[in-house]
Amino acid sequence: MIETLRMYMQYDMVRNALIVGVLIALCSSLLGVTLVLKRFSYIGDGLSHVAFGAIAIAAVLHLSDDMVLVMPVTILCAVLLLRTGQKTRIRGDAAIAMISVGALAVGYLLMNIFSASSNLSGDVCSTLFGSASILTLTKAEVWLSIILSVVVVVIFLLFYNRIFAVTFDENFARAAGTKVEAYNLLIAVVIAVIIVLAMNLVGSLLISALVIFPAMSAMRLFRSFRAVTIASAVLSVFCALMGILVAILADTPVGSTIVGMDILAFLICLGTARLQGRTSK
């Protein structure tokens, strides 16, 4: 097995997949804690479907770089979703469901009507579940992922205290002089960037797993926001790394394997938490 790994590590595509996969997992886990605590964790699933619809439109328009369309559309929808709820007649969860299902249906319809590929089922499956797209990244895509991931991490570290305040009590943060709307807008933009980046890793249907599972796993073991965030990041990076390596060695779908590792980590953390509870009693 070690020799096999050494052989695979000689290929640029494998090294690129590991680098991008780890960075995406790290970014997803950082904002995942905030989304779970704000009870808006399902936004990842909704935005991933929006990105799928945008990819379908980009394919219809024959855009050479679909990121030109996918990124701004996803960011716009993220802003709209996070601004719904108290100020609109459509509550946040209903808005997510409507946009999610609508974008998925319209995207698949467009791909069928204006299909320019002889393997439509393969293209759709690759977009939805990630397939092996993480192993076919171009140098431009790798560098774009690295740059955007660094930007996301820097933003999170710079505005950590404000994000913490907005996450737990928006009213108190507003009373303390924090521009809550501005920071919610910042969170929405960062989430959209992460969603678009993660589509190459796990596909549009499995993105929410990268956001939810590490955060929920860390919450089984820790209570403070800082500890949960750090533990979530460590678990997410470890599961992504192991998932990619197992997928390469066992020839399994990368996205599904990573999510499988996240599920296993959650079960282990859940079991550990229950054992600790019994021991303390």
Image: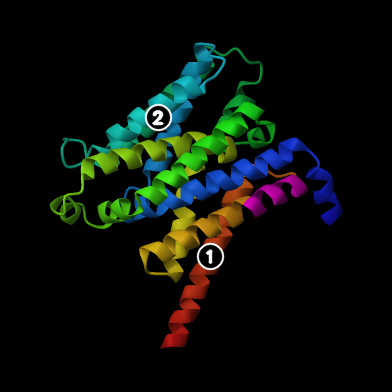
For the record, the magenta segment spans: 241-250
> Which numbered disc covers residue 26?
none
Tag 2 residue: 74
Of residue 12 and residue 98, the one placed in the foreground of this image is 12
Tag 1 residue: 267
Residue 228 place in picture, x, y as percent: 42, 63
Single out the residue that lies furthest toward the bottom. 281
The residue sitting at 64% across, 43% down in the picture is 19
Instruction: Name which residue type carries label 1.
Output: Leu
Single out the residue that lies furthest toward the right. 3
Q: Taken as a whole, is the magenta stretch helix, strand or loop? A: helix
For numbered disc 1, what is the local secondary structure?
A: helix
Dot 1, how many residues are within 10 Å of its Cα: few (below 14), some (14-19), or many (20+)?
some
Instruction: Name which residue type carries label 2.
Output: Thr
- Determine if the magenta segment contains residue 165: no
Q: Is residue 164 left or right of residue 278?
A: left
